[in-house]
Image: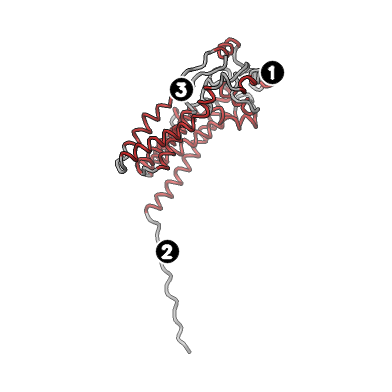
Amino acid sequence: MAPMIAPPPAAPRPRSSPERRERRRFAFGLTLIVIIGLGVRVFYVLVVTRHENSKFYDDAWYLLQSLVLSTGHFFPVIFGHGPDAAHPPLTSIVLTPATYFFKLPPGFTPQRLTMAGLGTVVVLLVGLLGRRLAGWRVGLLAAALAAVYPNMWIPNGIIMSETLTMLVMAFILLATYRLRRAPTWGNAVILGLGCGVEILVRAELLVLVPLLLLPAALATRTVSWRRRLLHVALGALVAGLVVGPWSVKIATFGSCPSASRMSTSPHLGQHEAGWLGGFAPPSPTIQKAEHSPAPTGSSMLACTLP
């Protein structure tokens, strides 16, 4: 009879490496912080800002443009005739899905919650940026500060461009870090894309191209000067392609066929205005907006058809 041979002892399970444990801790901590940040922002909207509906400021433009966008019209003068570009378009475009499904109820809660959600993404990106720059502990600390710092969550409860500005800026900083660490064509494209999108949120941030993209690309010493200049050109080209359609639309507002068709009738009637809950701009402001001259050059801050 053959002797019994004992099976070899099972190999011990490899312990998790310190790097893997750090990744798990960071992921768990960041998830918890993001949830807390979302709770802070939603609480602020539901308890405070949705009840503040008596002030008239730039949020009216963003809200009303999201309303007319949801009906298929492209940035007309509100309660008037002709096209309008008093602000860059991205904030209104981001609000359009919520407006399409919920219209503009009193308090504009769906639109405010949209901003609260975007503000929560800022917390996530700040945490990722901190981890890239100085390690997972710094990443968690940065995310925690972003979650509870009033100057970062208060704008998330109102309908303005600041929330989107912070979101895209966090993305741009991550893209800048990637380009510095790995100066590739793809990272130059990503940074140019971020700069272009940021311009569509706030037009004055066109300065990011010469003041951020240019030095970030030129400071990458691991590649030749020819490669650095090509990265600058590629990033600027991508930013221009992102902004180009809106800029061309502004430049042709006074002569494009769609503008003349749009000027035949107002886009917001009495029923649509009722969605604002009595929140409507005064007539003198509308008349001033309708007759303000179109800008020259690359200005995107005000452009209406006379």
Name the residue that disc number 1 marks: 270
Where is residue 212 drawn, in percent x and y?
37, 32
Q: Residues within 10 Å of mark 2 (few under 14, many from 20)?
A: few
Tell me the kind of residue under disc 3: Ser
Question: Compared with residue 254, is residue 187 higher up or lower down, i.e. above or below?
Answer: below
Q: Quadrant of residue 222?
A: top left
Where is residue 182 drawn, in percent x and y?
36, 44
Q: Residue at x 53, y 32 (%)?
A: 116
Give the distance between the C-alpha atoms of the residues marked 3 and 2, in whole angstroms: 63 Å
Of badges 1 and 2, the one in the foreground is 1
Tell me the kind of residue under disc 1: Gln
SS at mark 1?
helix
* Residue 170 in the figure: left or right of residue 112: left
Name the residue that disc number 3 marks: 298
Where is residue 96 drawn, in percent x and y?
60, 30
Q: Residue at x 36, y 29 (%)?
A: 211
Q: Residue at x 44, y 24 (%)?
A: 204
Q: Residue furthest bottom?
A: 1
Q: Is residue 203 visible?
A: yes
Question: Compared with residue 85, is residue 167 higher up or lower down, i.e. above or below?
Answer: below
Q: Residue at x 53, y 23 (%)?
A: 250
Q: Residue furthest right?
A: 271
Q: Residues within 10 Å of mark 3 (few under 14, many from 20)?
A: few
Name the residue that disc number 2 marks: 13
Q: Residue furthest top?
A: 284
Closer to the chain start, of discs 3 and 2, is 2
* Residue 89 in the figure: left or right of residue 187: right
Q: Residues within 10 Å of mark 1 (few under 14, many from 20)?
A: few
